[in-house]
Image (cartoon, rainbow, N blue to C red):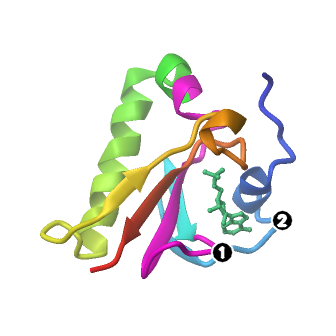
Amino acid sequence: MIYDKENIFAKILRGEIPCDKIYEDEYILSFNDINPQAKMHILIIPKDPYIDVADFLQNAKAQYQTNFWASVNIIIDNLALRDKGFQIKTHKGKDGGQEVFHFHLHLLSNS
Ligand code: AMP
């Protein structure tokens, strides 16, 4: 599978489609999910073009992966989630429930 530059998250990253931004840095963009499945439901996406988690783990440089997770850690603090309950989920492939083929984490919390 080839990365499709016209996927909706690529358009959000290019600023062609708006998003309800939560956090942004050099490595990631995070915004509210348009169809929330919990009291808080945000998406976290790397700025570099990876199709899904398997592509990211296989092809993103180790330093980029470290930076990505460091940014996730910042979001956890920014949203005061460190001492609360939350879920991090990711879908891989149509059979895994993935609809948008730019790697993303779902961060959900009802606390
Ligand atoms: P997935 O099934 O893991 O690919 O999830 C895709 C997620 O993207 C779904 O939870 C959608 O509600 C969400 N979504 C789709 N389009 C947008 C958008 N324009 N802004 C925010 N979230 C979106």
Tag of residue 34: 1
Q: Is residue 74 magenta?
A: no
Distance from Cα at disc 1 to Cα at disc 2: 16 Å
Ligand 1 within 8 angstroms of badge 1 C-beta? yes
Q: Nearer the viewer, residue 72 or 105?
A: 105
Q: Give the position of the N terminus as an image quadrant.
A: top right
Q: Quadrant of residue 63?
A: top left
Q: Residue at x 43, y 32 (%)?
A: 64
- Residue 93 is left or right of residue 3, and the answer is left
**Outermost residue, left direction?**
83
All told, the count of numbered labels is 2
Q: Give the position of the C terminus as an image quadrant.
A: bottom left
**Mark 2 burial class by Cα count in 10 Å: few <14, some 14-19, many 20+:** few
Q: Counting residues from the N terminus, which is met first, the one under dot 1 or under dot 2?
A: 2
Give coordinates of residue 98: x percent, y percent: 66, 44
Which circle, 1 or 2, is nearer the viewer?
A: 1
Q: Which residues are magenta?
A: 33-55
The secondary structure type at the circle numbered 2 is loop
- Residue 73 is left or right of residue 28, and the answer is left
Instruction: Look at mark 2 in the image and give the residue it sits on.
Output: 16
Q: Are marks 1 and 2 in contact (CB under 8 Å)?
A: no
* Image position of 40 with respect to 92: above or below: below
The secondary structure type at the circle numbered 1 is loop
Give coordinates of residue 27: x percent, y percent: 49, 47
Give coordinates of residue 97: x percent, y percent: 64, 45
**Mark 1 burial class by Cα count in 10 Å: few <14, some 14-19, many 20+:** few
Q: Amino acid at mark 1?
A: Ile
Q: Is any part of residue 51 visible from this angle?
A: no
* Image position of 31 with respect to 74: above or below: below
Q: Nearer the viewer, residue 5 or 34?
A: 34
